[in-house]
Image (cartoon, grey):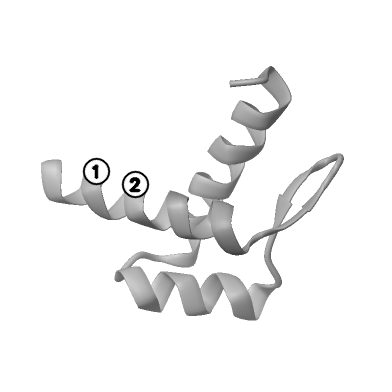
């Protein structure tokens, strides 16, 4: 569990650094999501959840 959390934190930091941001949130193309998933050993669904979490944090001002 701890290892997964660390990988997700690293993925989240990477996404924040490299994402295309807009007033509506953080976005990656499908190929970008696949690249990130392979880079961190995650599924594209897990990457999408991390991006959703980032969007929710941005909207809530965290």
Q: Residue at x 37, y 76 (%)?
A: 39
| Figure label count | 2
**From the viewer's perspective, is residue 58 above or below residue 18?**
above
Q: Which of 38 and 21 is in front in this view?
A: 21
Q: Which residue sits furthest front?
A: 17
Q: Which residue is drawn at 45% across and 50% down?
A: 12
Compared across the picture, whether 58 is left or right of 50 comes to: right
Estimate how packed mark 1 is, as few (under 14), some (14 to 19) or many (20 or more) residues with alpha carbons within 10 Å. few
- The quarter of the picture where the N terminus appears is top left
**From the viewer's perspective, is residue 55 above or below residue 61?**
below
Within the image, what quadrant is residue 5 found in?
top left
Using the rendered image of the protein, determine whether residue 20 is visible from the camera's viewpoint.
Answer: yes
Q: Nearer the viewer, residue 30 or 3?
A: 3
Q: Residue at x 65, y 60 (%)?
A: 19
User: Residue 9: which disc?
Assistant: 2
Q: How far from the left and from the top, in percent, is residue 35?
A: 50, 79
The residue tagged 1 is 5
Label 2 close to label 1 by CB (< 8 Å): yes
Q: Please tell me whether mark 1 sits on a helix, a strand or a loop.
A: helix
Q: How far from the left and from the top, in percent, is residue 25?
A: 75, 43
**From the viewer's perspective, is residue 53 above or below residue 49?**
above
Compared across the picture, whether 3 is left or right of 48 comes to: left
Camera-nearest label, 2 or 1: 2
């Amino acid at each position: 569990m701890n290892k997964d959390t660390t990988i997700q934190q690293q993925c989240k930091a990477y996404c924040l650094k490299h994402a295309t941001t807009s007033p509506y949130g953080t976005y990656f193309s499908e190929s970008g999501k696949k690249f990130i998933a392979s880079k961190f050993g995650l599924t594209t669904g897990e990457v999408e959840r991390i991006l959703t979490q980032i969007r929710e944090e941005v909207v809530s001002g965290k």
